[in-house]
């Protein structure tokens, strides 16, 4: 089996791989033999993907340190290796210890299962190895990407067909940009906002040429700020940093009990900033907060942005796909008034990792970030790279397009509706449990909760604030303990986060966080997750006994 392995073929009969040109030519020309290790894996994957993942990802408690030992050799591999040997190593050391994100019981993160057709299609995409930065390396892919941007723009903004006829393939306009994810999408959106605010004016050549210092001087600002709720994603902090705005000028506004930004407070903050000659460059609304899945009042934010005459960005990295659902899209009402919108296709659109999108309401908005170079991105060319932060980029648009086409809006609607319904079911299930406490009600398909023994729940209800604080700290320890044990046991996975809750307004608490986006997750699995957590709690050697001591002291006096 090995000597017909094609990665490097050695002419000698002993199995020692050596680097010779003939072998090297072969790795660029010869297909994998069907009975080689790699050939067999390909067969397994194409016949039964879930089976392959279930078999090769080993559910067992393995520490990160243990895995690090397998990847601690700094020596550059000197000799070639047979692909079969290498593949076997990957299976044993990498695949085996990977995270089973496709498992229906993996309900802790936004990374979910993929439709099966993504695999063979990705293979075609990689084989073509198009570079979307310019048409010379992506003819056909560039028009395709522009069409996908048009479709997504249409989903958010719903312009008429003349609009899309005019702008979809226009060289000087841009309906949006593909990028590696929500972070890059948010940075791009705020980049556009910054360059439009501080654009060329009279003698001044624009912030893109003269930099922040001269831009602020020219416009007479003491600084610029971006306003977002304190539930805004950390990528906005990175954006403020790289754009020279400063993380301290990304200003966090408080939220209400449903984790939605307090628009009045944002308005007051803007007025305060204005009195200090600090210009609000953009306000950001979140459509689907990362921790609790809540949606800001987008219409009110659009009004405020209009009043402030500033850019309105909506970070819908997670929640944007809700627009596919006729039943639930009203939750995002007002998004169509945003100047720019971030949507991650690698979240609720079930496209592989590395697929973010930013959309611009006005096709000319991105003109201020336009960049030209001599050998590519020439003026007047339709090269996508003239409006993207990234340079060389893969043809992920092919996979987004495929998902849109294969599933259709109706298919996505079924998925979105199912996820939201399942989150409602799980919230109801948690509310029925004597020993669990629901912390955030799901608005989309994310919810948070924690394990609280019933006697402690009762105590919390009647305790004064300092006693509550102490009990909550012990419960934090317990939640962390349960979450770690559950992750290490490897049967199921929920994530954890810290947040403030209306139940305990004066402290932040640690909670389990669940994202219900895998269509294969069943009600039985959700029941089992709670059962497992209740069992793991009993293994706690510190937190639970300490809570019991508190109870005992309470009973005694
Ligand atoms: C996931 C997420 C991001 C960041 O997206 P990446 O794809 O991880 O870069 C930004 N904002 C929100 C609301 C998100 O959920």
Image (cartoon, rainbow, N blue to C red):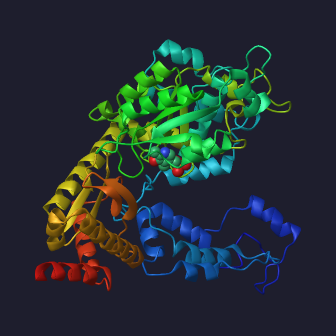
Image vertical order of residue 352 relative to residue 436, above or below = above
Q: Residue furthest right?
A: 21
How many discs mark residues in the rendered view? 0
The C terminus, quarter of image: bottom left
Q: Quadrant of residue 319?
A: top left
- Residue 121 percent across, percent down from the top left: 55, 49
Q: Residue at x 51, y 76 (%)?
A: 96
* Residue 491 as seen in the image, left or right of residue 337: left
Image vertical order of residue 550 relative to residue 157, above or below = below
Q: Residue at x 31, y 34 (%)?
A: 331
Image vertical order of residue 84 relative to residue 545, above or below = above
* Residue 325 as seen in the image, left or right of residue 8: left
* Camera-side residue of 532 and 239: 239
Q: Residue at x 49, y 32 (%)?
A: 283
- Residue 481 percent across, percent down from the top left: 36, 76
* Camera-side residue of 150 and 515: 515
Image vertical order of residue 510 relative to residue 478, above or below = above
* Residue 374 as seen in the image, left or right of residue 524: right
> From where the camera sits, is residue 404 visible?
yes
The N terminus, quarter of image: bottom right
- Residue 141 percent across, percent down from the top left: 64, 35
> From where the camera sits, is residue 147 visible?
no
Q: Residue at x 48, y 68 (%)?
A: 99
- Residue 104 percent across, percent down from the top left: 34, 62
């Amino acid at each position: 089996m090995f000597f017909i392995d094609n990665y490097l073929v050695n002419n000698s009969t002993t199995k020692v791989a050596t680097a010779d040109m003939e072998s090297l030519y072969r790795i660029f020309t010869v297909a994998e033999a069907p009975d080689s290790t790699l050939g067999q894996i390909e067969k397994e994957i194409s016949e039964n993907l879930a089976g392959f993942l279930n078999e090769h990802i080993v559910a067992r408690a393995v520490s990160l340190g243990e895995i690090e030992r397998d990847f601690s050799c700094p020596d550059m591999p000197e000799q070639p290796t047979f692909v079969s040997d290498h593949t076997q190593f990957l299976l044993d050391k990498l695949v085996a210890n990977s995270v089973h994100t496709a498992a229906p019981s993996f309900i802790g993160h936004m990374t979910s299962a993929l439709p099966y057709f993504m695999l063979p299609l990705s293979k075609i995409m990689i084989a073509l190895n198009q570079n979307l930065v310019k048409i010379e390396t992506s003819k056909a892919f560039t028009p395709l990407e522009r069409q996908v941007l048009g479709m997504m723009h249409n989903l958010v903004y719903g312009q008429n067909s003349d609009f899309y006829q005019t702008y979809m393939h226009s060289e000087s306009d841009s309906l949006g940009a593909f990028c590696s994810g929500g972070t890059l999408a948010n940075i791009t959106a705020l980049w556009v906002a910054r360059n439009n605010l501080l654009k060329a004016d009279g003698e001044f050549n624009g912030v893109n040429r003269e930099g922040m210092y001269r831009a602020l001087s020219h416009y007479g600002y003491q600084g610029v700020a971006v306003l977002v709720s304190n539930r805004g994603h950390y990528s906005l902090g990175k954006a403020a940093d790289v754009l020279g705005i400063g993380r301290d000028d990304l200003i966090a506004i408080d939220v209400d009990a449903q984790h939605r930004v307090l628009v009045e407070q944002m308005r007051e903050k803007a007025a305060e900033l204005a009195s200090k000659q600090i210009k609000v460059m953009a306000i950001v609304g979140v459509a689907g907060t990362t921790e609790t899945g809540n949606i800001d009042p987008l219409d009110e934010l659009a009004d405020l942005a209009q009043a402030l005459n500033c850019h309105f960005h909506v970070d819908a990295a997670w929640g944007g796909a809700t627009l596919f659902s006729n039943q639930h899209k009203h939750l995002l009402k007002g998004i169509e008034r945003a100047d720019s919108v971030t949507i991650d296709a690698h979240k609720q659109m079930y496209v592989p990792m590395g697929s973010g999108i930013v959309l611009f309401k006005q096709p000319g908005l991105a003109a201020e970030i336009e960049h030209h170079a001599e050998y590519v991105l020439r003026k007047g060319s339709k090269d996508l790279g003239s409006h993207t932060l990234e340079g060389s980029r893969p043809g992920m648009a092919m996979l987004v397009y495929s998902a849109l086409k294969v599933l259709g809006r109706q298919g996505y609607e079924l998925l979105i509706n199912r996820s939201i319904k399942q989150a409602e079911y799980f919230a109801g299930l948690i509310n029925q449990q004597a020993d669990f406490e629901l912390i955030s009600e799901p608005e989309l398909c994310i919810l948070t909760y924690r394990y609280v023994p019933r006697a402690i729940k009762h105590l919390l209800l009647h305790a004064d604030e300092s006693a509550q604080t102490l009990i909550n700290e012990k419960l934090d320890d317990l939640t962390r303990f349960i979450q770690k044990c559950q992750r290490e046991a490897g049967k199921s996975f929920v994530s954890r986060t810290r947040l403030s809750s209306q139940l305990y307004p004066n402290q932040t608490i640690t909670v389990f966080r669940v994202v219900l986006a895998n269509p294969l997750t069943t009600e039985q699995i959700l029941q089992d997750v709670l059962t497992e957590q209740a069992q793991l709690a009993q293994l706690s050697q510190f937190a639970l006994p300490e809570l019991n001591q508190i109870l005992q002291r309470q009973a005694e006096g």
